[in-house]
Image (spheres, helix red, strand yellow):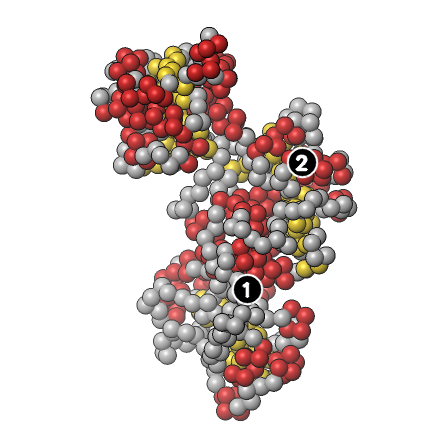
Amino acid sequence: MIFSRHTGKIFRGAFAVAMALCLSAAFSGECPAQNSESYIAPPVSISRDKVRIDGKMYYSHVVLERQTLYSISKAYNISIDELYAANPSLKEEGLKKNSIIVIPIRDASAQTDAVVIIGPSVPEPEVSPLENVAATVSVPENSIIHTVKWFESFEDIADKYEVTVEDIMKANGLTSRKITTHQKLIIPALAVSSVTEAAREEEVYVLPDSLGFVRRNISVLMMLPLKLSQKPEGETNYMDFYCGALLAARDCALKGINIELQVVDVSDGVPVIDYSLFDAVIGPVSPSDIETVLELLPSDKMLISPMNPKVLPLASTHPNLIQAPTPSGTQVEDLVSWIKEDLKFGDNVMMIYEKSSIGEESGNDIPEEAEKLAGLLEEHGILFTTFSYNILEGRDIAETMEIEMQLISDTKVIIASESEAFVGDVVRNLSVMEHKGHKPVLYSQSKIKSFETIDAESLHKINLHICQSYEVDYNSADVQKFLLQYRALYNTEPGPFAFQGYDLTSYFTDMIASFGNGWTGHLQDRTTSGLQSDFKFSRIPDGGFVNSATQRLVYAPGYVITKIDRNAGSPE
């Protein structure tokens, strides 16, 4: 459900998804102006697919973008009233892109064509015309007919029925792996034994008893500054988050978890809502809005901060606040731990920081950031040297830096600065050291990847070790499946916030489904990896929960990037 405080309208059920699609198109600038003088209705092609429902023949028509009831009725030579009669839901929901409607067939000769038989009164199994199937292929007894969905690949279908792609291709006489939406495929009989009759008829996932969900109906409130009443100006992060959450809700439904997702636009402030009705609240984003909700939230309900690391101080004083993004300070602590784990006899640890001209005048050239990092290194028992210079000295500092480094051992470097100019200069000087035969290894936070002035090749040469909160493995089968679904549904590429919306919604709904009302008591017991984010929660004394999960990446020459398996302690 989407609630727009600006319009006072509530949109429910499937229309919420359609609304999200429209909003997504609007944010990307692709939403057509229906009243524009330049608007041209697309042509409507007569469908070749036919169905028989309760003995009557219909065309099965897929609604394309910009098609209207008028254009469809004219193409099929029927009235709009006849369309409404065949599809009663049209009066309430209207036409939706990619939805399927049925259209009465007036031509009696069409009754002899091959059709899909629908309806409980038909005793025969479902049979359909099979696109791209040789004419000699017959449907074996007890085989399954699978209709290809928009988000499915050949591999998805094979995995679902526990057969190989080659088995399906052979059963259908196919020579190519290319399949299309709504295509009918014969699933070999060997797969029937692992799929129940209900799954064959409805094509739903079979839920093994071992899943053991405690809760199958979950109510989630999502509060985001969607700015529904304002003209979009390129800010799509929150809509991306919502779109990712919708896909997570859909995947949860396939596992048997029914999510009632209610979304509130808080662009103009937080409304007064009965929060006791929800199992969890995701959002808002700003610290001030979160504080407002926390004042209204019952003590036994949890608020999940979805994307703002700066909310951490609130988690220190509010037991029912969960900080989902890993704080930046946790990255620094993990970097120091990583250095200690990697230390070998004879290694040199060097902390580099930028001299402050203000500090020089006061007799203290050590900035606060460097003091904090030095204290952290000392807490971990790491012996280190310091090296500092002003960026104006950068071109002449290489000789002095070389004296500080040892030829025999590695020098593990950590920079106490977030200045792009200074960090870039340090990387340049470390590259010079590498060229001269030294072995510098730089340990850094993820922010270094966003510095456009730093050459990527240099980071690989100095074996960058990076600690971060987010990473997407595009070679992962789960990620590739998500990409296909997102592109097909929203006609765009998912950004980091779309992955975050999917991961966060999937993780917390799974926790509620698995443990019921006592799910927060198990947060510290379950460490989970999502498509982009990892979740490892710990309780702050007298406060809420904070995510301490980080990911470690190692850059190597040849543009090789390796993710470290934290459990095994070695690259994956």
Q: Residues within 10 Å of mark 1 (few under 14, many from 20)?
A: some
- Work out whether residue 282 can be spotted: yes
In the rendered structure, the answer to whether residue 94 lies left or right of residue 140 reads: right
Where's residue 439, x and y in %? Answer: 28, 22
- Work out whether residue 524 can be spotted: no
Q: Report the residue at 54% width, 33% height from top.
A: 326
Q: Report the residue at 58% width, 32% height from top.
A: 310
In the rendered image, the residue lying farthest to the bottom is 108
Where's residue 464, x and y in %? Answer: 35, 29
Residue at label 2? Answer: 288
What kind of element bears circle 2?
helix
Count of residue discs: 2
Q: Amino acid at mark 2?
A: Ser
Of residue 243 and residue 416, the one placed in the foreground of this image is: 416
Q: Amino acid at mark 1?
A: Glu
Where's residue 271, x and y in %? Answer: 73, 46
In the rendered image, the residue lying farthest to the top is 363
Question: In the image, is residue 15 above or below residue 568?
Answer: below
Which comes before the other along the chain, label 1 or label 2?
A: 1
**Image quarter of residue 302:** top right
Q: Report the residue at 56% width, 60% height from top.
A: 22
Question: In the image, is residue 485 above or below residue 202?
Answer: above
